[in-house]
Amino acid sequence: MPAGTLYRGREGMWSWVAHRVTGVLIFFFLFVHVLDTALVRVSPEAYDDVVATYKTPVVNVMEYGLVAAILFHALNGLRIIAVDFWSKGPRRQKQMLWWVVAIWVVLMGGAFYPVLQHTLRTLFGS
Amino acid sequence: MSAETTPATAAAHDVSLYDVDNPAPVIEAPRKRTKKTPKTTRTNFELYGWLFMRLSGIVLVVLVLGHLLIQLVLDGGVSKIGFAFVAGRWASPFWQAWDLVMLWLAMLHGANGLRTVINDYAERATTRFWLKNLLYAATVFTVLLGTLVIFTFDPNIR
Ligand code: HEM
Ligand code: HEM
């Protein structure tokens, strides 16, 4: 890379980076997810065994992370679509990013207990 | 930089930088079709890919967020999931169809997105070629396996 041309974007660049990273992450999860779901064709025990790993605290926390990634990718994806198809989209792209972040924070707050309740209950009693 | 030495100054003083002996360089229009442009680029594949990313994205918002709501949020979160739960859900053609459409759309959307990422970062032509073939093979395999599982699911496997 030629010296002095390193592009340091602002919100627009970082939202693009986050969109790309989350997209790739979800794709790899989906690949594994279809493989583990395919175990229903092997035996109920084989399927229940892998699902048991989904219920361990560490993986449960990773599921919350997956929800975080998908919620961002989905909300920001809608923002990209609005920028491309809505006449006022390009001018409001930054404003819409803050909406994405705000809605993301609210939904992540709401998802905290439901998604992690399995771990919270097994770790901290009934 | 001193103002006297910049070309802009020449223009500002109404003196052209170029003349008959010293013509301005020709700048070709971006992506101009030349005799060497391969025929295979003369389709609208990338346009349809771009459109597909947006249309599938809108549908996936409903399908994937609905799926996550059912699997991870409602009714005890992940605790309830097991073979019996899946058997109950795939007893209904509605949820079979939901999962089938979600499988195809998410895999094609994700694969097309990853194709862009590979094109961006893999600089050597052979690396690009093999990474994309690996991607296509994994995608076809996953879509076919997932489809097979939905259509052949047997609640009385034992
Ligand atoms: C939940 C609803 C979703 C929406 C609204 C959405 C939206 C989008 C949009 C509009 C793009 C195009 C970005 C561009 O052309 O610059 C995109 C790219 C992408 N999406 Fe999604 N998507 C969703 C779900 C998914 C899922 C489930 C996956 C994985 C299986 C995924 C993986 C990707 C990847 C890998 C890219 C390419 C990123 C890049 O080129 O930087 N998306 N998404
Ligand atoms: C950790 C979060 C997730 C859990 C616990 C989960 C759970 C499940 C379960 C129990 C099934 C069996 C069928 C059913 O009940 O509908 C299933 C199937 C499926 N899920 Fe998920 N899911 C999760 C995340 C996702 C995500 C993020 C996607 C999409 C990007 C996805 C896509 C699918 C697909 C396509 C199928 C059908 C698989 C097949 O055809 O064999 N899931 N999931």
Image (cartoon, coloured by chain):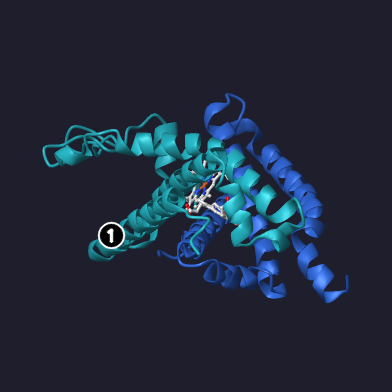
The kind of residue tagged 1 is: Asn
- The residue to which callout 1 is attached is B133
State the SS at label 1.
Answer: helix
Instruction: Reply above or below: A101 against B137.
Output: above
Residue placed furthest toward the top:
A87
| Occupied quadrant, residue A75 | top right
Q: Residues within 10 Å of mark 1 (few under 14, many from 20)?
A: few
Picture coordinates of residue A83, whole percent (x, y): 57, 33
Inspect this view and state whether residue A73 appears. no
Spot the residue most to the left.
B35
Q: Position of residue B47 (x, y in %)?
A: 36, 34
For the point 64% across and 43% down, which residue is it? B66
Depth order, front residue of A120/B80: B80
Circle 1 chain = B
Is ligand 1 closer than 8 angstroms to the Cβ of mark 1? no
> Chain A in the picture: what colour?
blue
In percent of the image, x 59 and y 55: which residue is there?
B86
B95, B77: nearer the viewer: B95
